[in-house]
Image (tube, rainbow, N blue to C red):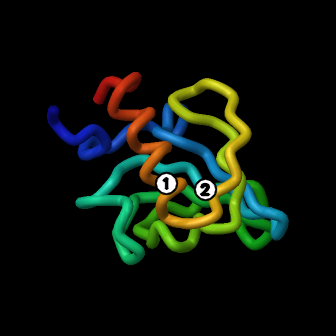
Amino acid sequence: MAITGRKTRDVKRPYAVFTNTSGFTYRILKFYGDPTKPYARVFLATNSPFTHGSLEMGDGYVTELVGSICTEILGEPAARVVYDTGSIKSILKYVQEHGED
């Protein structure tokens, strides 16, 4: 099976959306390599109290998502707490099984 997540998705159609209690919202637009590794990179569109309603786009680490809540996967509502990178692995598995690149 090909690894899903290698193509960059549109901001309106991210692979997954994560939020945290600090007001940050992360939209995963692309995975680089194996996202189950602690320092795996992802391409993110991030909204925060510091961006004043706009999105900042750039690379981040999967570890930034630990402690967040996954609120959306492939456009479908979700409510999964991300405790560790293993949680990211289960989300990626769902994306691989149900998503299209």
Q: Quadrant of residue 77?
A: top right
Whether residue 34 is situated above or below residue 72 in the rendered picture: below
How many numbered marks are there? 2
Q: Which residue is mark 1?
A: 88
Q: Image point 63% across, 36% down: which residue?
A: 72
Q: Image point 27% across, 38% down: which residue?
A: 4
- Picture coordinates of residue 5 (x, y %)? 31, 43
Horizontal arrangement in the rendering, residue 78 relative to residue 7 (left or right): right
Q: Quadrant of residue 43?
A: bottom left
Closest to the observer, 76 or 36: 36
Q: Which residue is mark 2?
A: 26
Q: Measure how far apart labels 1 and 2 are at the Cα level.
A: 13 Å
- Picture coordinates of residue 99 (x, y %)? 38, 25
Helix or strand or loop: what does disc 2 sit on? strand
> Image quadrant for the C terminus?
top left
Circle 1 residues within 10 Å: few <14, some 14–19, many ≥20: many
